[in-house]
Image (cartoon, helix red, strand yellow):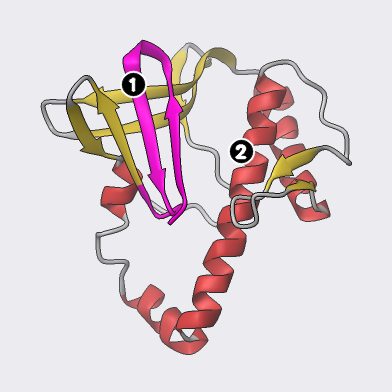
């Protein structure tokens, strides 16, 4: 079973098991990630119809490919926010294979869409990749980007999908 343990800021440790389960530790307290909790919620009839249409194996392959794409683009966006330039042949780790791979054309287009949004909106970056740990309610998670847009504070979650869901 694949397990990744990352020490983060402020004594927080992020533990990811087989890319499907994530926990955070602070001191002697372990709490599940918000994303992992949300994976337990019912997905609705359209999702289950899609799953029935595709079948389990194909649906898992689609989900895995989408997750790999999202991870690579997410890490490239992090690099952009750190001021790095990302060439078309930049390589990022594929979570499924653990190999460094060049960004695909689709992944690079996602990165360019982020860049166009960032250049047009001009958000003032306050922080990125911030772990929020709620020991009272027993969960934790990572905020991709906190920024100010038109004097309002925004929490941004990077996504590579085609749709926006409530």
Q: Would you call the spot at circle 1 few (<14 residues within 10 Å), some (14-19), or many (20 or more)?
A: some
Q: Where is residue 132 in the image (x, y as percent from the top left)?
A: 32, 24
Please report the residue visible at 43 percent of the width from the left and 20 percent of the height from the top: 8
Q: How far apart are the two marked residues, 2 and 1, measured between alpha carbons? A: 21 Å
Q: Dividing the image into 4 quarters, which one contains the N terminus?
A: bottom left
Say if the magenta span includes residue 11: yes
Is residue 77 visible in the rendered image? The answer is yes
The image's mark for residue 74 is 2
Q: In which quarter of the image is residue 66?
A: bottom right
Q: Where is residue 28 in the image (x, y as percent from the top left)?
A: 17, 24
Which residue position is annotated with label 1? Answer: 12
Q: In this view, does 94 lie to the left or right of 38?
A: right
Q: Can you say whether 119 is above or below 141 in the image?
A: above
Say if the magenta span includes residue 80: no
Please report the residue visible at 50 percent of the width from the left and 72 percent of the height from the top: 60
Please report the residue visible at 71 percent of the width from the left and 49 percent of the height from the top: 99
* Of 22 and 125, the residue lying toward us: 22
**Magenta extent:** 1-21
Reading the chain from its start, which is encountered first: label 2 or label 1? 1
Q: Can you say whether 35 is above or below 140 in the image?
A: below
* Of 41 and 153, the residue lying toward us: 41
């Amino acid at each position: 079973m694949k397990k990744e343990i990352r020490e983060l800021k402020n004594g927080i440790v992020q533990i990811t098991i087989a890319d499907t389960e994530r926990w955070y530790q602070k001191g002697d307290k372990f709490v599940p990630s918000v994303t992992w909790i949300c994976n337990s919620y019912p997905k609705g009839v359209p999702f289950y119809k899609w799953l029935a249409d595709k079948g389990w194996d194909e649906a898992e392959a689609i989900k895995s490919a989408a997750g790999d794409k999202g991870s690579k683009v997410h890490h490239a966006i992090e690099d952009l926010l750190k001021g790095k330039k990302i060439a078309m042949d930049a390589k990022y780790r594929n979570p499924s294979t653990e190999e460094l791979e060049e960004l695909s054309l689709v992944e690079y287009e996602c990165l360019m869409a982020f860049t166009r949004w960032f250049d047009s909106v001009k958000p003032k970056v306050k922080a990125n990749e911030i772990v929020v740990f709620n020991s009272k309610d027993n969960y934790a998670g990572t905020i991709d980007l906190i920024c100010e847009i038109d004097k309002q504070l925004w929490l941004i979650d990077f996504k590579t999908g085609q749709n926006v869901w409530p």
